Image (cartoon, rainbow, N blue to C red):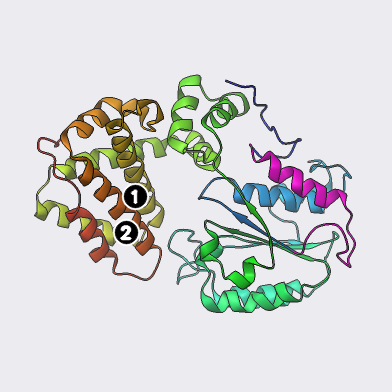
Amino acid sequence: MSTVPAFPTDDWPVYGHGWAVHLLQQALAAGDTAARRSGPSHAYLFLGVQQVGKTTLARAFATALLCTGGGAAPCGRCRACMLMARGSHPDFHLVQPTNKEGAIDRDGGELRTERANDLVHDAALRPLEGRWRIFLLQDMQLANASFSNKILKTLEEPPPQTILLLTATDRKGVLPTIASRCQVLDLRPLDRATVAQALEQGCGASPADAELLARLANGRMGWALDQLHHPERRSERTQHLETLRRLLGADRIERLTFAASLAAKRDRDNRELFGMLALWTAWWRDVMLVQAGCDDAVSNADQLGEVHRQAAAIDGGAVRSALQTLQQIDSYLHHTVNTRLALEVLMLKLPKLEGSHP
């Protein structure tokens, strides 16, 4: 395993993505002219799968832009850095998806029109303390059409001291007219060795935990850190995998009953639903890998025996069909759709495996 320092990217609070940090450092070093002849662009679009590090990198860049320490990385000591660490810098604004009640919801929520109105107004104001007013717009793939159209004017005619940082899981989820006005940074999942060693050396994880979480993370450093710092979520993983195993041996009535209960719970906890779907997706991927003789690439390494049992008992075509259905249902549930009907389709298309009850 290669040596990976706790923060391998020139003292930025970011794991991996060194090429992107270097590019952003070049923008910082080029100057800060309000005329935009050099220095940072007026807008950046950070792309990548969920929890790969988009928001972490965008926040680090925002902190570096506001930092008064004068270095190539946030100093962590000046007033601006300390305000950013506390989430209270008056020139940094975080815009997140919300549900209909106004609560933050990054799974089933939207970036809504009223937030775009606030952003357009605030972006025209001068900074209160620093050189820039910075807006971080999370999950642009969840923006409604009105939100996107309203911020487009700000992107087309950006105020001289305003910088917009956008994140999205996929460029296809962002209006082309918005993406074309941003400098795009497409972040790729990190390799397993980088994640494992960062967890062990930078976060104090045991070697066994670091290796397992690195496998399960599939390159998503944010996911691995979340699991490390919230051990209770590992028990959720166990429960979700046990539920899948039980459903493989269940009849239609039991499967449809579970779909109904899951649809009712969605109103209270989108995170749990989408977390379960992601775990099931990774599970079927592992079954396919074992069927192809690629045991070393399996994510659920601590469940390898059960993965082998299912790989031997379930036809490869049924596994591929289950995986495709999961991916389709996950996509549907991120849009306006009948949740119960979608989950019923998912349950009925699960393979049948006799003797799967715990």
Res. 115 in view: yes
The CA distance from mark 2 to mark 1 is 9 Å
Can you give x and y, in whole percent of width and height, for residue 207 in the image?
Answer: 50, 20
Residue 329 marker:
2
Residue with the mark numbered 1: 277
Please provide the residue range marked out in magenta: 16-42
Residue 222 is situated, as x and y percent measured from the top left of the image, at 54, 42
User: What residue appears at the point 47 percent right and 38 percent down from the top-left corner?
Assistant: 218
Image location (x, y in percent) of residue 238: 31, 36
181 in relation to 357, above or below: below
Q: Residue at x 76, y 76 (%)?
A: 157
Q: Type of residue at label 2?
A: Ile
Question: Which quadrant does the N terminus fall into?
Answer: top right
Does 19 lie within the magenta span?
A: yes
Instruction: Name the element at disc 2.
Output: helix
Query: Circle 1: is it few (<14), some (14-19), or many (20+) Cα within 10 Å?
Result: some
The image's mark for residue 240 is none
Residue lying at 48% horizontally and 31% vertically, measured from the top left: 214
Q: Quadrant of residue 246?
A: top left
Q: Is residue 233 inside the magenta stretch?
A: no
